[in-house]
Image (cartoon, rainbow, N blue to C red):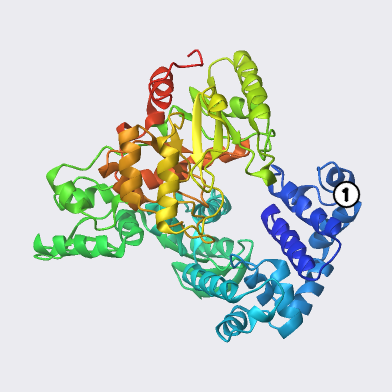
Amino acid sequence: MDNKAIANILYETADLMEVRADDPFRIRSYRRAAEAIEGLDQQLATIWEDEKALLAIPGIGKGMAANIRELFRDGKLTVHAELLQKYRPSMLELLKIQGLGPKTIALIWDAFQVCDVEGVAKLAKEGKLRALPRLSEKSEQKILKAIETYRQITGRFHLDAADAIAQKMTELLKGLPGVEKVTPAGSLRRGRETVGDLDLLVTGDCCTQEEQRNKVLEQILSFPGIQEVLAKGENKVSFRLRSGMQVDVRLLPPDSFGAALQYFTGSKYHNVSLRQRALKLGYTLNEYGLVRIEDNKRVAGKTEEEIYKKLGLAFIPPELRENCGELEAAEEGKLPELISEADLQGDVHMHTVATDGKCTIEEMAEAARERGYKYMAITDHSKNLAFANGLDDKRAEAHIKKIRSAAKKMKGITVFAGIEVDILEDGELDLSDSVLEQMDIVIASVHSRFEQDREQMTDRLLRAISNPHVSLIGHPTGRKLLSRAAYSFDSDKVFAAAAQAGVAMEHNAYPDRLDLSDQHLRQAKAKGVKFIINTDAHHTTHMEKIRFGILQLRRAWLSKNDVLNTLPVAEFAKVVRRGKPVLTEV
């Protein structure tokens, strides 16, 4: 049982306790423990028997240490099992629906003894929920809309969740006789913003030598968290994890690896177009290789590159394989030189302990420097985000001084003083202009009133863009993948205004946002917008998630010239100040 699984059990327990109206302090203790365990570098499996080591973890007291030992000893937590028995596992599914918090679910349970998605949807359609305290006809419509959204996203997973499984499987199989490498394919390799299932290709002699193959298959089936084995053959294993993710692992000989990787990477429509091209040129293409029809001779298949070359095409990066003109561009030699992570000079959206971050200014700056960045920015929240301990004018000015003081001590990296300022309901910014003008970089973001209509939200964003101190718009559509849809606004108007004003659009690379989407990135680029890619890091470990955002930029056909934080520090500082004097010495 890994740390994430333990944290999930504790989170679920806290949620179900809230439904049961348990003591708030006890509920918070479970959530604090879950957060602490999620942030641990060390696996609890290595220390669970050592009470002293458990108690040394912030947020873990004697009672919670006993719970952790019970989980490892018995494979379950008694209080968690009892709550599931009382409310049934379907209650946990209800808790995933936006707007259906524990208190609302408790109301519904007490009144109707209903705790599943279908049952709640039926009650809402019949107009029965509006009779409950704090609920209305409008509440029912919101619940129905949230349930519809939930149904659309069920069975999808964040990119980093799929990537973590791929890395764990690689570690599990690495070093086994006959295994050369383990390679993700499918939508993970293409960088789709969410993943339905996970395809993994195992290359080496293990697929042809029975003894090696059997050992590899046995090792695959020992993967932690397997709930159900769906299929097992000589060269393929499919299973479903407790999370619901399906994983398909295929064993391949090196000679057909390229063909299989191309085939299982997809997309379906890219592959159809590529096969049609192959037929026109006198070949057939499948997962085993490229074969000349005339004499049935296999002419390519060991690598993807040789397949594309044989078909008269430049190599097409996986992120572009969506049948959106990439074959034509490859034939004409017009594929863009896509941005890479190595092109980035800095990350300029980060939070610290001053608001809702977990690390200090110095810790974040040190981590950025270790990643090879030339600059970074501290951009804590403004006061409208009260739950995040946002900064008012006075605290913001004091924070600027603190950042500049820390920056003087840091060698080898420029530390900018910035802010993520809330765009209020009417488009005003959450801090005064006299404070904002002291910032090196100002990220303006919407964090509230997502339900505003299209016209209101458009005006709100346009007003923020018109503020001369704003450098960029943060996570511009407000979406959270698999939980919250984007708010409605006129993207053509907003992108055109941003381009004219010299305000950049952020691509927020954190995997639960990936905002802007690849489609919006293309649309904004067509309007002349420039971009800044950031992680919105709240901990030093979050910085590595920039790679998931890079995938989205590549899917949008962007090059380094489209992204401002590929610029050298002095040039970047000048651009984000929008013509005003640069404040930080670079």
| Above or below 284: residue 438 | above
How many discs appear? 1
Q: Where's residue 364, x and y in %?
A: 61, 29
The residue that appears at 45% across and 59% down in the rendered structure is 453
The residue that appears at 26% across and 55% down in the rendered structure is 301
Apparent side of residue 71 relative to residue 7 in the rendered image (left or right): right
Q: Where's residue 294, x and y in %?
A: 8, 65
Depth check: 194 or 238 in front?
A: 194
Apparent side of residue 352 relative to residue 66 in the rendered image (left or right): left
Q: Where's residue 236, x and y in %?
A: 45, 68
Residue 468 shows in the view: yes
Element marked by disc 1: loop
| Above or below 566: residue 120 | below
Q: Name the residue under label 1.
A: 61
Depth check: 53 or 345 in front?
A: 345
Apparent side of residue 296 relative to residue 193 in the rendered image (left or right): left
Depth check: 361 or 213 in front?
A: 361
Q: Quadrant of residue 407?
A: top right
Q: Residue furthest bottom?
A: 126
Type of amino acid under label 1: Gly
The residue that appears at 31% across and 53% down in the rendered structure is 258
Apparent side of residue 172 relative to residue 149 in the rendered image (left or right): right
Badge 1: residue crowd in 10 Å (few <14, some 14–19, many ≥20):
some
Residue 75 shows in the view: no
Q: Quadrant of the N terminus?
A: bottom right
Q: Where's residue 360, x and y in %?
A: 68, 29
